[in-house]
């Protein structure tokens, strides 16, 4: 496989990207979910001579009893099993739901599935702590069927921005809560990045902006030649991106549109402004990615009420929860036990959450440390769920070609329509389970 830097000069100071202040509230480092390790094996006392004292024998028996008890707890509880003993299809740690697991082979390790979602450890902010936003005044946009910020925004091109999701170094992100549609895609290891699609709102600034992956080709394909903003890529990926139906406004092409902030370490501090990118390139209005429904329209067969969903992208590093909020009538995102807010203290929320289980394959490229970069197979078919309006709907998805949109079919082979508003699409590895809570 060709090895090349993951973040070339287009993601560094050598590009000539200027530094600029980026005001943001301070945030503590966000912990990852480290797997809980089981007890170590007891020392082996086989071969102790008969001359040993009774004290030694009693101590050995007591130690053996303790080890047996710990092993029994692991077998019964399931949550203290070392991550190295879990297969790739297992759900790691506490998961939510009533036992509904899709896309997973039967696991040899018992998994706990409580009836409620795991509790978040962060107290939600109040609206008074958020940066004020003006109410939208434009007509409905094609990607949300909800009002855009201003008249004319509904006719402009979509912009796809690759946004960092490093739990320790990238949060809180800027502009993420303003995206019309967000795709969460797996990158190296158990980590993910966001492909955030903007059309109805300006995000000034937006970021941290990171590098492209071959999965992005399948995302931009249905958006009618969108603008594509990213920090760079290795030579092979750049060649693939150049052939995709997109207009390149990345840092390698428009270095003057990007700047460094002071809130995160390099390379987690590259930003741009969507308003700058829109002024630079002509417009191609995107078509809707799905149909929309009214709040009283039928949901289709087998829809059921849900308080949310919990999923793992693998490796026990990244746990994602979407929790239904009855006050806002949206699902709010949590990551590794913490409520997800952007830099302006707005929650990351969605009217619709798609859990699209996909197969990841070797892209043929490696990142800067030599790790294989995965690629999601987005053309084809698969299964999943749609969460919308406090309900969960089982679906099958189908995408026939690069530039066609993905159709989500219900059990009657009818396309599922979405509620107006923002949508998140979780491109979850097919071998990983997802739990739907009651």
Image: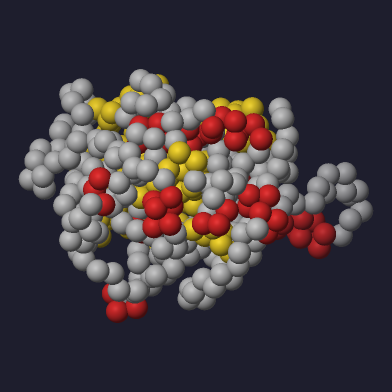
- Residue 251 x/y as whole percent: 57, 50
* Viewer can see residue 104: no
Of the pair 291 and 50, the residue shown nearer to us = 291
Residue name at image x 55 percent, y 57 percent: 256
Relative to 366, is 78 on the left or the right?
A: left
Q: Nearer the viewer, residue 388 or 317?
A: 388
Residue 247 can be seen in this image: yes
Check the image and report above or below for 410 versus 97. Answer: above
Which residue sits at x=21%, y=29%? 415
Query: Does residue 380 appear to the left or right of 50 in the view shown?
Result: left
Front one among 346 and 436 = 346
> Residue 299, image x and y in percent?
15, 38
Residue 381, quarter of the rendered image? top left
Percent from the top left, x then y, of residue 7?
65, 47
Count of numbered labels shown in the rendering = 0
Question: Is 12 placed left or right of 153 in the picture?
Answer: right
Viewer-closest of 137 and 418: 137
Residue 158 shown left or right of residue 216 in the figure: left
Residue 127 coordinates in the image, percent (x, y): 28, 74
**Residue in the picture at 71% in, 27% down:** 1
Q: Quadrant of residue 384?
A: top left
Residue at 51% from the left image edge and 63% from the top image edge: 171
Q: Which quadrant would residue 261 be assigned to in this image? A: bottom right
């Amino acid at each position: 496989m060709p090895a090349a830097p993951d973040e070339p000069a287009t993601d560094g100071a050598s590009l000539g990207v200027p530094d600029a202040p980026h005001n943001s509230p301070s945030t503590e480092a966000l912990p990852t979910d480290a797997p809980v390790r089981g007890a170590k094996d007891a020392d082996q006392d086989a071969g102790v001579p008969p001359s040993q004292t009774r004290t030694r024998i009693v101590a050995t028996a007591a130690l053996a009893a303790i080890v047996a008890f710990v092993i029994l707890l692991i077998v019964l509880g399931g949550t203290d099993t070392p991550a190295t003993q879990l297969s790739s299809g297992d759900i790691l740690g506490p998961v939510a739901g009533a036992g509904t697991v899709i896309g997973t082979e039967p696991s040899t390790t018992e998994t706990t599935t409580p009836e409620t979602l795991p509790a978040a450890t962060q107290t939600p902010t109040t609206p008074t702590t958020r940066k004020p936003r003006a109410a939208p005044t434009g007509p409905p946009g094609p990607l949300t069927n909800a009002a855009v910020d201003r008249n004319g925004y509904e006719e402009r091109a979509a912009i796809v921005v690759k946004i960092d999701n490093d739990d320790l170094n990238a949060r809180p992100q800027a502009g993420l809560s303003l995206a019309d549609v967000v795709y969460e895609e797996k990158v190296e290891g158990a980590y993910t990045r966001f492909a955030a699609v903007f059309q109805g709102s300006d995000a000034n600034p937006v970021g941290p902006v990171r590098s492209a992956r071959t999965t992005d080709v399948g995302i931009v394909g249905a958006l009618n030649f969108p603008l594509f903003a990213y920090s760079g890529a290795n030579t092979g990926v750049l060649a693939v991106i150049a052939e995709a139906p997109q207009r390149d406004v990345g840092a390698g092409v428009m270095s003057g549109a990007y700047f460094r902030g002071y809130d995160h370490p390099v390379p987690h501090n590259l930003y741009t402004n969507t308003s700058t990118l829109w002024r630079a390139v002509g417009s191609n209005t995107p078509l809707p990615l799905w149909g929309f429904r009214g709040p009283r329209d039928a949901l289709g067969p087998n829809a059921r009420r849900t308080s949310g969903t919990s999923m793992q992208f693998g490796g026990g590093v990244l746990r994602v929860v979407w929790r239904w909020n009855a006050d806002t009538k949206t699902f709010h995102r949590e990551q590794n036990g913490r409520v997800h807010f952007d830099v302006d203290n707005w929650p990351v929320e969605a009217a619709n959450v798609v859990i699209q289980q996909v197969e990841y394959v070797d892209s043929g490229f490696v990142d800067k440390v030599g790790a294989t970069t995965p690629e999601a197979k987005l053309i084809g078919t698969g299964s999943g769920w749609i969460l919308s309006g406090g309900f969960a709907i089982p679906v099958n998805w189908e995408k026939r070609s690069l530039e066609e949109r993905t159709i989500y079919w219900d059990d009657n082979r009818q396309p599922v329509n979405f509620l107006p508003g923002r949508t998140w699409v979780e491109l979850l590895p097919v071998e990983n389970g997802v739990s739907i809570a009651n």
